[in-house]
Image: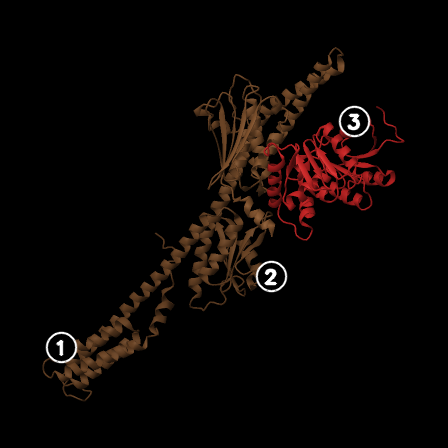
Amino acid sequence: MAANPESAARILVIDDEPEIRKLLRVALGAHGFHMLEAGSGREGLERAALDHPDLIILDMGLPDIDGLEVVKSLREWSTAPIIILSVREQEDQKIAALDAGASDYVTKPFNMGELMARIRVAFRNLVPQANTPIVEIGGLHMDLYARKTTVDGKEVRFTPTEYEVLKYLAINAGKVITHRQLLTHVWGADYTPDIQYLRVYIGQLRKKIEPNPSNPSYIITEPGVGYRLSTPESSA
Amino acid sequence: MAVPIWMRASTRPRLRKNLYLRVPVYDYLIVAGLLIIVTLLCKTTGKFFNLTDVAMLYLVPVLYAGARTNLYISAGTSVVGVLLFDLLFVPPLYVFSVSDLHYLVTFAIFLVVGIATSVISTRLRWQAAETNLAIANLRTLYDLSKELTAVTEINDFAGIMVRETSRTVGDDTVIYLPDPTGRPELFAASDPSSSIATSNKERGVAEWTFENGQEAGYETDTLPGAEGFYVPMKLEDTVLGVIGVNTSKETSEDLPEKKDLVVAVARLATLALNKMLLSMTTQHVKNLEESERLRTALFNSMSHEFRTPLASITGAVTSLMTEDIYSADERADLLMTIEEGATRMNRLVRNLLDIARIESGTVKLNLGWCDIPDIIGVAVSEYEEEWKMRPLEIQTQEDLPLIKVDCQLLSQVLSNLIDNAIKYSPQGSEVRIAASADENSVVLSVADRGQGISNQNREKVFEKFYRLQTPMNVSGTGLGLSICKGIVEAHGGGIRVEDNPGGGSVFVLTLPAERLRPEDILDEGAL
C-alpha cells in the first residue's frame, strides 16, 4: 500500500542510523504512514517545528543532543505522541523520557509488529477515552461507569486502591505506565509511596484477574520501567 | 639487635624529673610516723635494744622513704634519722655531738643507705613506668598494624592513619599521599579545620618532606617554624607519603617521646602502605592476565558463536532474495530462521556485556523490593513461542514475601536458566519453575528433563567457557551460567545444580534476601 502524502498520518523519525531510518521508511510506508526524517536532535527539533508531525519516533542515543532533552524541548510546545527507541543500556534515560512526557518506548533491536502496535496505541490514546467507559481486553471486562469488573464473566471485587491501579492501567490500555506515573496518579503527587506498594498491589491484582499470576497475560511488567495493560493491538 | 625506636627513650630528662617527683602527703606522714614510732619504741623500752639495734631500726623509715618517695625526702629522712639517733641515743645524750668517732661511720652508712635505696628504687620505678609506656605504645602500634592489615582501600588507610595517630599521640594529624600525577595531596586530616590541615605554610613543609624524604617542621633542623612535625613514609628511596602531627602544643619534656612515636607510626604505615600498593599492583596484573585470557577465549568462542546465527540469517535472506521457488510455508520457515538467528545474536551481545560488567567488577546492584512471581513472569515471557510447544509449570508458594534484590538481574538469571533448560532438553519436554521462601532464604529453581549433569561437572558448569559435551550439539558461549553465578553471588546467594528426580537437572538459587511481607505493606498502605 502506498502512502498518500496528503492524507496519511505523518511520522517524524529522529535517528542518526541511516539503516534504521531506511527500514522504518519501508515499514511505515507499507503501513500507510508518511515518514519525515531527521538524523540529529537539532534537525529533528527543526523538522518538528516546521512540519508538525502527528507522531514522533525518537532515538535516545543521538550524536548532538541527549534524547531526554529533545523530549523536553518538544513537550514545551508539541503534544504529538513521542515513541522512544532505545537500547537496553539507556534504561534510566528511557524512564526519564517517559516521565518527561514521552508516550511509549520500544527497545532496540525491535520487533516491527510491536512498534506498529505502539504507534496504533499512541494514536488511539489521542482520542479522549472518557466517553468509552467500557474497557474490554480478552476475558477482562471493566465497566468504569458502574465500577464493575468481570473476568471471564465472573465478577471480581477489588479494594479501592487496587481498583484505582487497574483503572488507570485500563484507561491507558496498551501504553506503558511508569512506576512514578502510576504512583502519582493513585496516591497523589503530594504523597508518593515507594515502588514496593505498587508491587504488592499489582501482585494482588494479578491474583484476582490472571489465570497464572507468574505468567501474566493482562498486566505485563515492563522490567525496570513500569506496567502495561496488554491489549490485542499492543502485543505484536 | 637494634633496639626498636619506640623502646629507646631519652632517659635523662625523665630521671631528673623523678628527683622532684611529687610525693603524696600520706607518704610524708608515714615516714614521719615511722620515725616517731621507732623513737618512742626505743626510748620506752629502755635498755632492751642496744645502740646497734636502734640504728638498724632507724633504717626502717629511711628504707621506706627511699622506696616510696623521691631522693630529697629519702636523703632528708636519713639526715633526720641520724640526728635523732645522735640526739636521743648516742652518748652524750641530748646534744649533737658524739663521744666516739666510731659513730660517724654509722651516720655515714645511714646516709649512704638512704640515698642508695632511693636512687635504686627511683630508677626501678622509672624503668617500670618506661616499660609500661613502651608496652602501651607497642600495643597501640600493634592495634594499628592489625587494623591496617585489614585495609585494602587507600582512603580507608588514610582515614585510619589520621584517626589512630591523633588518638595515640593526642594531637591533630594529617596525611599526604601522592595524587595520580605524583604530587603530594592532603588525603585525610583528623580535624579538617585544624591549622595544620588548612595552613599553606604547613602544606609547604609537608611538600618539602615529600620531596626530600626527611623529617621537617616543628623543632627540627628544617623549617622549624611550622606547627607540625612531618615524617616521610619512606621505603628505600621512594617517599610513599607524609604524616604530619601538630606537636607544637607538647611540652619540651614530652616532645622527644611524641616525635619518636610519630616516627614509629610512620614506619608502620610505610609497611602497610607498601603492602597495599603491592597488592594493588598484583591485582592489576592479575586483572590484566585474566582479561587477556578472557579475550582469547572470547575470540575463539565468539567467532564461532556469531557466525552460526549470521550464517543462518545470510543463508535464509539470500535464498529469499535470489530464488522464487519457495512456497508460502517455506518462506515463513526461512523468515523464522532469520528471526531466531537475530534473537540468538541479541542474547549473545547481552551476555557479552554482562560478563564484561561482572568481570570488571562494576555490576551495580539496583536493589529494590521485588515480587517473585513478577520476576518469574518477566523471564518466562521472553520464551513465549517456546511455551506453545512444551509445557511450562510454575509453582510458587502462597504468600511469598517481597525480596530486596535487583529485579532485572534476577529475571535475567532465570532467563539464562530457562534458556539452558530449553536448549539442553528434548523438544516438548516440561520445564518447571518453583519458588519458595523459608525463614532464612528464598529458593528459586528451574528444572528440566534433559540428560542431567554428572557429579564431576556440577561445579565446572558454572565456570566461564566451560561447556558440556552433549549428543545434542547445543551451541553456546559457556557464559550463561557463569553470569548467573556472578549475579547470584553479588546478591550474597548461591547457585547449584541437582538431579531432577525422574531425569534431568534442577538449577537451584538460594538468596538470603531481605524480605517484606505484603501484609505489612498493605497495612501501612491503608493508613
Q: Is mark 3 on a helix, strand or loop?
A: helix
Which label is found at residue A27?
3
Q: In this view, does B3 lie above or below A149?
A: below
Q: Is residue B475 above or below residue B4?
A: above
Give the class, few, some or many, for how many residues have Cα within 10 Å of label 2's Cα (few <14, many ≥20). Answer: few
Tell which chain the image draws in red. Answer: A
N-term mark: 1 or 2: 1
Same chain assignment for discs 1 and 2: yes
- Provide the residue designation for mark 1: B53
Say whether mark 3 and mark 2 are on the same chain: no
- Quadrant hosting residue A143: top right
Q: What element carries label 1?
A: helix
Label 3 crowd (10 A; few <14 / some 14-19 / many >=20): some
In-front residue for pair B353/B517: B517
Relative to B257, B66 lies left or right: left
Asked which quadrant contains residue A204, the reply is top right
Q: Residue B200 carries which label?
A: 2
**At 78% from the left edge and 29% from the top edge, which residue is drawn?**
A24
Report the amino acid beneath label 3.
Ala
Q: Is residue A83 above or below residue B186?
A: above
The residue drawn where x is 36% and y is 71% is B17
Mark 1 → mark 3, Cα distance in angstroms: 126 Å
Identify which residue, A4 or A232, lies in the foreground: A232
Q: Which chain carries label 2?
A: B
* Number of the front mark, 2 or 3: 3
